[in-house]
Every structure is written in structure tokens, then in C-alpha cells.
Image (cartoon, grey):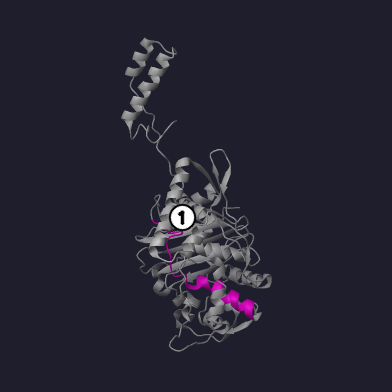
Amino acid sequence: PNNPTLYDPLKHFDYTKTRQERLLKELKNAGVISKKEYKKAVKQKIKLDIKEKKDAYPDYTTYVNDEFTKLVSSSEGFDERLKKAKTKEEKKKIEKELSNRITALLTKGVKIYTALDPAMQNRVVQQVNSKLPYEGVQGGAVVINHQTHQIVAMSGGKYYKKYNFNLAYQAYRQPGSSIKPLLDYGPYIEETGATAGSMIDASRFCSRDYCPNNYNEKTYGTVSLKTAFKYSYNTPAVRMLNQIGVQKGFSYLKPFGFDKIVQRDYRLPAALGGFTDGFSPLEMADAYTTFANNGSYTANHAITKVTDLKGKTLFKWKDKPKQVFSIRTNNQMRTLLSAVVKEGTGKKANFGGGYRGGKTGTSNDFRDLWFVGLTDVYTMSVWVGKEAKGNVEFLHNTAPQLLIWKGTLQNAY
């Protein structure tokens, strides 16, 4: 209809009634209806058949709204302009222009096509809701089909409501040991030619005043990379980053475009997940898809395309793959990741059939529990913790992050 906002009967009933009478008058004047029919129709009470809008997948659609803005920004050059902006005023002006552009597109009408998998979405939401019955404990999760590079499901938190703070992509948390494959082991194997069977010192380590401990302050001698990785020993990981150099290690993170990495993160504690702000579950799942694609990284998205109302494609992601690790290094990493699930700290996530691999992560003082892992088709990350960043050590043994991962993916085949 003409001007649907103005003649919305829920918001402007008077305008709707006036328009009804005008149209009926034109029908009478044109001889389509009689004067008697006109008088009867004008007096007829308007009854509205109102259907409630359903937000069946609020976690996912909230993210899609944000990704739509990013897609337009990337496609129409707003990204580049924002990078080049020299003042806050200039940046605000560009952001307002982008906001107006988004409003104009939505007002005109677009169709946004996504990779949502309803069955997977329902499963991940159900798992987060059911596996975290504890007061104040929250969780976020993201599932990516790494074969198609598409985000297929996510949980923004327990009993998530649309447009609330979304823990799947808006919460940045300390990654703990889940960063080790990306920052320590992958780069170390790539730079030194090591294998899963290569030996590494797991005894005490000190660099100036930084002396990290292994879990429960245990000390070990020389162990294989596989042993150090599957049991998540800390000192070998720090030694690896120290040996190749912090700058070199961080250079391997650049292709992933992590939002919150800053210059002061470039130090040895980062080897164990010590960052200023941290990473979101979406970022971690996105980066781990590299291990499912022979060491090659391609950005993953929820939106497959955006068209106008006639079906003409207006926007589409145009990401190019980047080779982060060699195939040789990637194969070694897949061996390590698999050992975690089969024999190590991630055993509770294991289920039969096909490839299973991943890495657990626990931040200082048990504030964050992570598991990021992959199967033959999917890469999934799970974060569990308190929104106010409290201690969740009481969950260490039950490991709900592993159970959520397993419960979501074991019925996906």
C-alpha cells in the first residue's frame, strides 16, 4: 500500500479511517458502488486481524542485524573511510552517514538471506539453557559450518531476548589456554619444523619477573608436544612463544582480525591467554576453522546475500582465503587437537564417529571456561562464566562447556 507507515492502523488509526472513506467515495463517484452501498460501508466498523510478530531465533537475528551493517560498510567503502578518519568528529560524521544509509535501505525494503540452520540453532539454545542451571552463570556459543564458511547457529546467553547483550559475539573474555593453538603451538611448529612427537621442556620457567606455573603448580621434565598440549601444561607454551619471539607469534593472529588486541598485549603472558580485553566466542570459532581447512583461513558469515524486493543482489561478502599455517603444520595441529578430546582435558566432549578435536581454556581465578573444537563439518566455540566476571571454579569438574559442545554436535549427523 501507498505510504504504509503513515497509514499503519495500529499507530495512526485516524489516517486509516480517513483513507478508507476517501477510497469508498471514489468508488461511489466512479459508479462501482451505489450511494446506499457507500453509506453502509462507511459506517462499517474496521476490525483489525492482528498477528503477533514471532522472533523464533532472537540470538541469531540480533547478530544478523549487526552483520548487515558491517556488510554495507565493507561493500560501500565506509570501512576504509573510518580507518582514515583523523578526528572523532570526522568518525562520528561517517558513522551517522552509515546509519542513515542502513535506515534508507531497510525503509526501501531488502531481503536478507542467511545460513541459519534451525535444527542446530534450537539445539545450541537448548543446550546452553539446560546445562547452566546455576544462578548468575551464563554462556555463549557459536557453530560454524567450516566447509561453507557460514555461521549456522549461536546462543547469545541463557533465555536470550532479541537485542539484549549477545554473549556469542559482544562479550570479550580471557581465552585461557584456548589461545595456545593459534599463538603458541601453531606458530612454533611452523617456525621450527617441530612435530607432535617433538620434545619440549615442561619444568619451571622465568623471564624477568614473569614465572608462570602449571596447573596445581606441578612441575614436569621433558615431555612431547602432544603430552604438553593434551594436558594443557603452561610452561612449554610460554617457552614456545619465547623461543619464536612475541612479535612473530602475534603475526600469526593478524589474519583473523581480532577486534580487541592492543599493543600492550604483546608480551609473554599472552601465551596463556593474558590479554587486556580478550576474544568473543564468535572470534574463537572463526579462527579455529583454519584447522579444518588445511591451514587456510576464510572469514565466516551468517549472511549469504542481500537482495532488493525484486531479487536483484545488492550485497554479498567477497572474502579471499589466507594461508596461515602450512598443510604440514596444520596436520600436526589436528593431531594435537584430537589428542585433547581422546585422551586429555577435553574427554567429556568426545563422541563417536569422524574427526573430533579441540582445546579447553580456563582463565585466571576460574573466571572463564572455554572449549573450542571441530568435527568434520562444524567448528564450535563455547564460553561459560559469570557476566559480572565472578569465579566459576565450582564448575571445573562438571565442565558444562564440554557438555554443551557435545550435546549440540553429536546429533548433527
Residue 187 picture location, percent across and down: 59, 76
* Disc 1 target residue: 155
Quadrant location, the N terminus:
top left
> What crowding class fits label 1: few (fewer than 14 Cα within 10 Å), some (14-19), or many (20 or more)?
many
Q: Is residue 329 left or right of residue 8?
A: right
Q: Residue at horizontal 43%, vertical 41%?
A: 54
Residue 360 picture location, percent across and down: 51, 69
Q: Residue at horizontal 54%, vertical 62%?
A: 286
Q: Is residue 56 left or right of residue 373?
A: left
Q: Is residue 296 left or right of residue 407?
A: right
Say which element carries label 1: strand
From the viewer's side, name the closer residue of 14 and 77.
77
Q: Establish if 63 lies above or below 311.
A: below
Residue 365 in the magenta stretch? The answer is no
Residue 14 picture location, percent across and down: 31, 29
- Magenta-colored span: 165-191
Identify residue type, mark 1.
Ser
Q: Is residue 258 visible?
A: yes
Q: Establish if 193 lies above or below 342.
A: below
Residue 330 picture location, percent across and down: 64, 70
Q: Quadrant of residue 12?
A: top left
Q: Establish if 12 lies above or below 209.
A: above
Q: Residue at horizontal 55%, vertical 87%?
A: 221
